[in-house]
Amino acid sequence: MMKNKHETDSKKILIPLILSLVGFTALYQLRPFLSDFEFSYVSFPAYTIVPAVLVGFASFITIKLYRRNHFQVKAFLMFTLGTVCWFVAEQIWQAYDYFWDGEPFPSEADIFYIASYPLFTAFLFLSLKPILSSVSRNVWLFAIGLSVSFLVPSVAAAYDDIYGESSFAVSIALAYPIMASVQLIPAIVGVLFLAKKGANFSWMLLLFGFIVYAIADTFFLLAQIDGSYYDGHPVDVMYIYTFLLCIFAIQSRLTSLKHDPNEEKTFFFTEHVKFETISKFGIPLTVAIVCMVILISLIDAVMLQTGEELSIESLMLGIVGMLAVFGVIVITINKNLSRLVQMRTKELTEQRDNLENLVEEKTEELLKSERLSAIGELSGRLAHDLRNPLSVIKMSVDLLKQSNAQSKSPDESFEKRVGLIEKSVERISHQVDDVLGYVRISPLKISAVNVYDLIQNSVEKINIPDDIQMNIPKNEIKLDCDPLKLDPVFINLIVNAIQAMPEGGEIKIIVSESHDSVILDFVDSGIGIPEKDLDKVFEPLFTTKQKGTGLGLASCKNIVEQHEGTISVSNEPTTFRIILPKNLG
């Protein structure tokens, strides 16, 4: 649904953009039939209104991003300042053309034109920041090489033309091709990235705009050098193309932000952008621009430049250079389309498989949750009902032991049988406690306790075999917790450690603290936990013991998490680590 929405919005913007490009192209075809004064009614509004609209759009989106504290606000501040420089330069240029006498070089307009280059270069690099790490060295080398191909002849021609002038004039003349070439590098990288992974429609328009502007600069420089430039020259409409592409790029972005607020997080580049953008919109737009520029250049050559061979040669050189740039871009894109289709197909297949696996996992979790809920409810009732008869049996066993001890001739076999009954009762009681501990979730009763004292209290309730050595370093660490709930957690971990050491060993309980947490490590020298079972030990009903319920560690996990803590396990040696916040609630 969202994809269709984006495509619809792109088409709604692409159609007015092409109509605008065609409209301005048609207006500039009137130049051969109009005088300089008459054509000023076309060029003056074009170079006043269009740049002003661009400044307005750029300022609006920058303010919008600033209010949302968007990470792209710095980039678009650079873009806005660059468009302001464009606008001011164009107005100064027109003032010299129509109102002031002479056309000095360098003029105030040149200062603003040159100032725009570092601003737009900064904008491009800031915008490319999310994908710079993905750009290969070959892409950078290609972009630099293509940029240098524009730079070398332009610098040579500019230097030859202005040789002998003041150093300031020479610096300004050389600054144009040098800074234009630097600006072209990130623009080419961005366009080539379109062929690799893709970017959204507005970013594509901006990149095309900057490349058209770089080509127009080279074209304009050649026309100025050979003296063939005039108001209404084909290069003028190329600058208009740049303004229009930038205006519609920002309009596209504003539309996307309005319909999909989440898209502002990535703004230009995202893993979810479809590569079809370049094939559906980029290639037709490129072909349209190239065809229109060729058309107006040919009309200019035939109707206005007849007999001026140097001018026609320069014009044709500019057209060939422009076609070479767009040709390389289009060929690169087309070359990668089949590979992109395969990549996208693979991605969709992986997404489908992941979705199917996710549905299966969630279904299993739901069934397991329902099963555990039913088992828990039944187990809770059974455990509660078992407690009363167990209490009676335990009391009876105690009376029998007492009676046998007081008799004149105690029966040793009787004592042995009663001991077996007592152990069985303790085992059943322990399993009942596991079930109830997992099923019951009661509120915490928080109090400040000494962790060492809390552990010692739990140890005293356990029958520690003689061949088991307990090592509990004394400390004075305080903890906010529910001691009655943590007590069975410690007992469970210690009992499990004892059972893991049938031939004896050492249990070490290490208590440490960080800035705001208490860390308890229960370490034993037992046989360890099989690696395949490490991720399952805290799952309900999972047990490797024949007489276990599989709820002991699950219950421990519930209690620790109720204390906003975590519990984990690792091997070599077997270590259960509990991390609890010092101050709870």
Image (tube, rainbow, N blue to C red):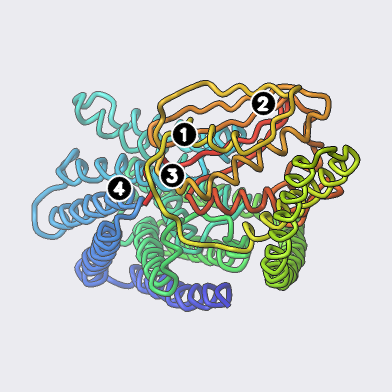
Badge nearest the viewer, 2 or 4 = 2
**SS label for mark 1:** helix
Q: Amino acid at mark 3?
A: Leu
Residue shown at 33% from the left, 55% from the top: 70
**SS label for mark 4:** helix
Between disc 2 and disc 3, whose residue precedes? 3
Q: CA distance from mark 2 to mark 3?
A: 95 Å
> Along the horizontal axis of the image, is 96 left or right of 584?
left
Q: CA distance from mark 2 to mark 1?
A: 17 Å
Mark seen at residue 310: 3
Q: Quadrant of the N terminus?
A: bottom right
Q: Nearer the viewer, residue 431 or 187?
A: 431
Q: Which corner quadrant of the image does residue 267 belong to? A: bottom left
**Most distant residue in the left direction:** 100
Circles 1 and 4: CB atoms closer than 8 Å:
no
Q: Mark 2 sits on what residue?
A: 507
Between disc 3 and disc 1, whose residue precedes? 3
User: Does residue 99 appear in the picture of this structure?
Assistant: yes
**SS label for mark 3:** helix
Rate crowding at label 1 as few (under 14), some (14 to 19) or many (20 or more) other CA atoms within 10 Å: many
Q: CA distance from mark 1 to mark 4?
A: 52 Å
Q: Mark 4 sits on what residue?
A: 74
